[in-house]
Image (cartoon, helix red, strand yellow):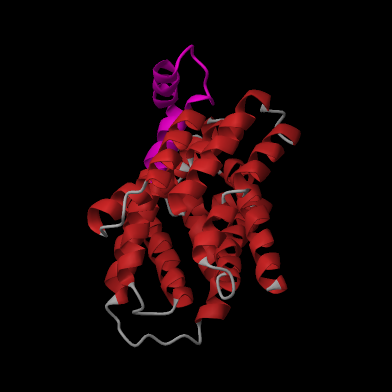
């Protein structure tokens, strides 16, 4: 049990730090090269843990490819959001992926809609509205949507939630480690093909050469946040591990304040409310 919670603590810290790394790795372009590095190096870090895995059913590849397509597009928006927005503003909005995941699960997986989940949705949206105070609830939400960095994070959250539905549908066709490694490889491959077709393969070594520490750190955090989750859920229920992982939002916001000097005091209530809402939805 101690090792499980230690791994979960490592996941929370790495997830929190990851947003600053992605912000440093990103650029003013479409960030396809950054996404390639993020997942390509992540796949290399996961390779030693996945190399001995053998699937019993190769149909998982179709699910991994479908998720890879969604995560490829999602992470372009993720990079864009963190690149142009304040971490303390856009990171809590990323928690909306719990809301989108629940709605999609109700539609496609027939999950139950309970009063606790309704309260969780209300808390998430109210907490989100406090991140940009504009006089009233509706004006505040409109301000969130009209902010490009926030809108990009909303799109990212929806696409990630859609990918999670596909991941759930993959079921027990293959081990989580091999499935995750396959998704990472597909995302990197999709980004590689895009860069090749647009004559931009030179962007990859250029990015790694210009930002070597950010590149290595991005792959490391991307790989080990997932690996630590796998270690944690051997003992801890997923329904506990995932909400606890949302505490990484607090880590990101704190780092945004200390390192990037962002003004986070007015946003802390929104951070806490979105986390509390996510907990209720996942109950």
Residue furthest to the front: 115
Residue 239 higher or lower than 32, as above or below: below
In the image: residue 182, left or right of residue 277: left
The image position of residue 138, as x and y in percent, is 39, 19
The image position of residue 135, as x and y in percent, is 48, 11
In the image: residue 182, left or right of residue 208: left
The N terminus is located in which quarter?
A: bottom right
> Foreground residue, 134 or 182?
134
> Foreground residue, 202 or 24?
24
Residue visible at 59% across and 74% down in the picture: 235
Does residue 135 belong to the magenta stretch?
A: yes
Numbered marks: total: 0
The image position of residue 215, as x and y in percent, is 61, 54
In the image: residue 60, left or right of residue 237: left
- Residues rendered magenta in the picture: 129-157
Residue 138 higher or lower than 242, as above or below: above
Residue visible at 35% across and 57% down in the picture: 163
In the image: residue 148, left or right of residue 271: left
The image position of residue 102, as x and y in percent, is 36, 50
Residue visible at 61% across and 30% down in the picture: 269
> Foreground residue, 55 or 95?
95
Residue furthest to the right: 258
Residue furthest to the top: 135
Does residue 146 belong to the magenta stretch?
A: yes
Residue visible at 54% across and 53% down in the picture: 243
Residue 180 higher or lower than 187, as above or below: below
- Chief secondary structure of the magenta portion: helix
- Using the rendered image of the protein, determine whether residue 225 is visible from the camera's viewpoint: yes
- Using the rendered image of the protein, determine whether residue 27 is visible from the camera's viewpoint: no
């Amino acid at each position: 049990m101690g090792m499980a919670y230690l791994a979960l603590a490592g996941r929370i810290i790495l997830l929190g730090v990851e947003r600053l790394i992605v912000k440093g790795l990103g650029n003013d372009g479409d960030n396809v090269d950054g996404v390639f590095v993020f997942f390509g190096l992540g796949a290399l870090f996961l390779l030693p843990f996945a190399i001995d895995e053998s699937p019993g059913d190769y149909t998982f590849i179709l699910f991994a490819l479908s998720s890879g397509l969604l995560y490829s597009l999602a992470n372009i928006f993720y990079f864009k959001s963190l690149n142009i927005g304040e971490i303390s503003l856009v990171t809590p909005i990323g928690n909306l992926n719990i809301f989108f995941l629940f709605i999609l699960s109700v539609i496609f997986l027939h999950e139950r809609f309970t009063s606790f989940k309704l309260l969780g949705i209300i808390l998430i949206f109210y907490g989100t509205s406090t991140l940009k105070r504009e006089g009233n609830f509706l004006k505040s939400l409109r301000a969130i949507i009209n902010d490009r960095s926030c809108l990009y994070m909303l799109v990212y959250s929806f696409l990630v939630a859609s990918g999670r539905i596909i991941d759930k549908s993959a079921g027990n066709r293959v081990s989580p480690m091999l499935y995750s490694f396959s998704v990472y490889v597909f995302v990197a491959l999709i980004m590689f093909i895009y860069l090749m077709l647009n004559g931009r393969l030179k962007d990859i070594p250029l990015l790694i050469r210009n930002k070597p520490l950010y590149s290595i750190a991005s792959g490391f955090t991307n790989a080990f946040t997932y690996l630590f989750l796998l270690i944690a859920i051997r003992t801890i229920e997923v329904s506990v591990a995932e909400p606890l992982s949302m505490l990484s939002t607090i880590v990101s916001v704190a780092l945004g304040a200390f390192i990037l000097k962002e003004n986070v005091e007015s946003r802390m209530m929104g951070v806490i409310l979105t986390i509390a809402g996510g907990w209720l939805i996942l109950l």
